[in-house]
């Protein structure tokens, strides 16, 4: 602690640097990002003196604490206690991570500027590398294309589209925040270029969920961020034309986005058995349903789906019953954590989203902070859109990239509240 007292300025600067380069740490994998996250959390707890526990907190904080204890109880009574506890016991670190980011942002707005340029550099580097891999079948460091799906520096981890979609609204939020008073035709074209570039990158990754999520995000932006309305309208037109041309001239993308989707989801609007998910996903969902029906109160334990999905009472006669997780956050919570945890999570998410969204529109007039807040809200909330497949609710990498925008969201809301 003596180090902190003698070198407070340097200590703060180190935390500022970690926040700014955190998206870069995520590309390297979870290890360095975890180290950075824990350093931020410990620094925050020390500097804030645990004041967030002493403040008058909302009902949402108490519900989060209840949810946390339910997850631990679910782990303790599960069949694989220690394996499950590794996921549930430390889950609050992601909430603290967001609080730490907002805390340090309140100490220096300069982090926003640095974060913007770091994100811009990352997006353009990924664009160059992904295009190189798309056309030459390997990226600039020799990583080969995987199953005709571009992954860039992520290698065998096919998460490039997921990475871009989760951070894209945050990138636009930072541009809006920093250059709000300096909007010009040139800046509008630059933002439009970023929209089109990100669309193309998501398209060549072949990630269907990311493809639908970015469309969903831009629909929200179109309705709720007037500053971007013209840009997004033009982007939609370019997007539709580009999709039509690109799919007709690129066999692998057409196969992945159109033909595979039709084949594995059996899309046929005249067919009463229409379903929006693949056979594999549907059977995993059905296995999850069996787990829930047999363990309604507490589930089978956080992250235990992979351990139990091959059991006869859950698998039944399904060919595709097993995976590392159920591929949908809400279904995973029901199967692994039980009904009460599921209901509390749904209440926290949908109620808080509705409350802060409506409150922002009706109460606050500062357009700069309002637009920036809404974009951060789009970035964070789209992670939990229930009608798409998703990653593992307890995966550390996924949670770090999901909770990163929440820190900026909390900061924007705090600043917005001060500028009524």
Image (cartoon, rainbow, N blue to C red):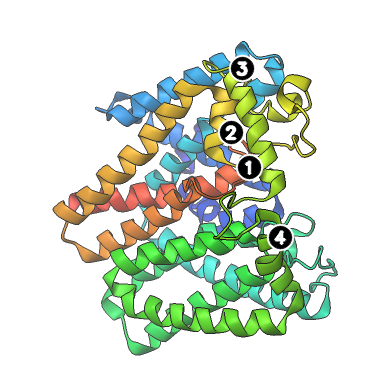
Label 3: how many residues lie within 10 Å, few (<14), some (14-19) or many (20+)? some
Mark 1 touching mark 2, by CB under 8 A? yes
Q: Secondary structure at mark 1?
A: loop
Q: Secondary structure at mark 2?
A: helix
The mark nearer the N terminus, 3 or 4, is 4
Q: Which residue is painted at 70% across and 73% down in the image?
A: 254
Q: Give the residue pinned by disc 1.
A: 327
- Specify whether residue 405 is in view: no
Judged from this view, the residue extending furthest toward the bottom is: 185
Q: Which residue is painted at 60% across and 35% down in the image?
A: 394
Q: Give the residue pinned by disc 3.
A: 294
Q: Secondary structure at mark 3?
A: helix
Mark 3 touching mark 1, by CB under 8 A? no
Horizontal and vertical percent for residue 417? Answer: 20, 49
The mark nearer the N terminus, 4 or 1, is 4
* Between marks 2 and 4 in the image, the one whose residue lies nearer the viewer: 4
* Between marks 3 and 2 in the image, the one whose residue lies nearer the viewer: 3
406 vs 257, left or right, is left
Q: Give the residue pinned by disc 4.
A: 263
Label 1: how many residues lie within 10 Å, few (<14), some (14-19) or many (20+)? many
Q: Which mark is residue 239?
A: none
Q: Give the residue pinned by disc 2.
A: 332
Task: Judge whether 204 appears above or below 46 on screen.
Answer: below
The mark nearer the N terminus, 3 or 2, is 3
Gap between marks 3 and 4, in whole Å? 32 Å
The mark nearer the N terminus, 2 or 4, is 4
């Amino acid at each position: 602690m003596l180090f902190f007292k003698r070198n407070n300025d340097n200590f703060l600067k180190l935390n500022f640097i970690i926040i700014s380069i955190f998206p870069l740490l995520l590309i390297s994998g979870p290890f360095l990002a975890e180290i950075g996250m824990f350093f931020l959390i410990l620094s925050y707890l020390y500097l804030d003196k645990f004041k967030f526990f002493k403040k008058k907190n909302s009902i949402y904080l108490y519900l989060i604490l209840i949810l946390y204890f339910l997850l631990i109880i679910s782990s303790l009574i599960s069949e694989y206690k220690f394996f499950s506890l590794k996921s549930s016991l430390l889950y609050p670190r992601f909430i603290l991570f967001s609080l730490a980011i907002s805390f340090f942002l309140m100490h220096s707005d300069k982090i926003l500027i640095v974060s913007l340029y770091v994100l811009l550099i990352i997006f353009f580097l990924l664009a160059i590398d992904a295009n190189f891999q798309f056309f030459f079948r390997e990226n600039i460091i020799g990583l080969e294309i995987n199953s005709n799906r571009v992954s860039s520096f992520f290698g065998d981890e096919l998460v490039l589209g997921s990475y871009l979609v989760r951070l894209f609204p945050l990138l636009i939020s930072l541009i809006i925040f920093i250059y709000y008073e300096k909007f010009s035709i040139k800046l509008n074209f630059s933002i439009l270029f970023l929209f089109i570039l990100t669309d193309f990158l998501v398209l060549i990754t072949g990630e269907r969920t990311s493809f639908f999520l970015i469309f969903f995000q831009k629909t929200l932006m179109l309705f709720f961020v007037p500053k971007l309305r013209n840009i997004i309208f033009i982007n939609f037109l370019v997007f539709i034309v580009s999709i039509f041309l690109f799919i007709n001239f690129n066999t692998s993308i057409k196969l992945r986005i159109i033909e595979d989707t039709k084949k594995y989801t059996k899309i046929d609007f005249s067919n009463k058995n229409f379903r929006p998910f693949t056979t594999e996903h549907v059977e995993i969902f059905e296995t999850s349903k069996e787990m829930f029906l047999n363990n309604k109160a507490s589930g089978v334990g956080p992250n235990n789906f992979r351990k139990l999905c091959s059991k006869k009472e859950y698998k039944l006669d399904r060919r595709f019953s097993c995976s590392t997780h159920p591929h949908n956050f809400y279904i995973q919570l029901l199967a692994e954590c039980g009904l009460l945890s599921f209901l509390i999570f749904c209440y926290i998410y949908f109620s808080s989203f509705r409350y802060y969204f409506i409150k922002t529109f009706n109460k606050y007039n500062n357009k700069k902070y309002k637009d920036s807040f809404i974009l951060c809200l789009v970035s964070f909330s789209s992670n939990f859109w229930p009608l798409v497949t998703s990653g593992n609710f307890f995966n550390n990498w996924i949670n770090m990239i999901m909770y990163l925008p929440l820190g900026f969201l909390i900061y924007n809301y705090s600043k917005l509240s001060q500028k009524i």
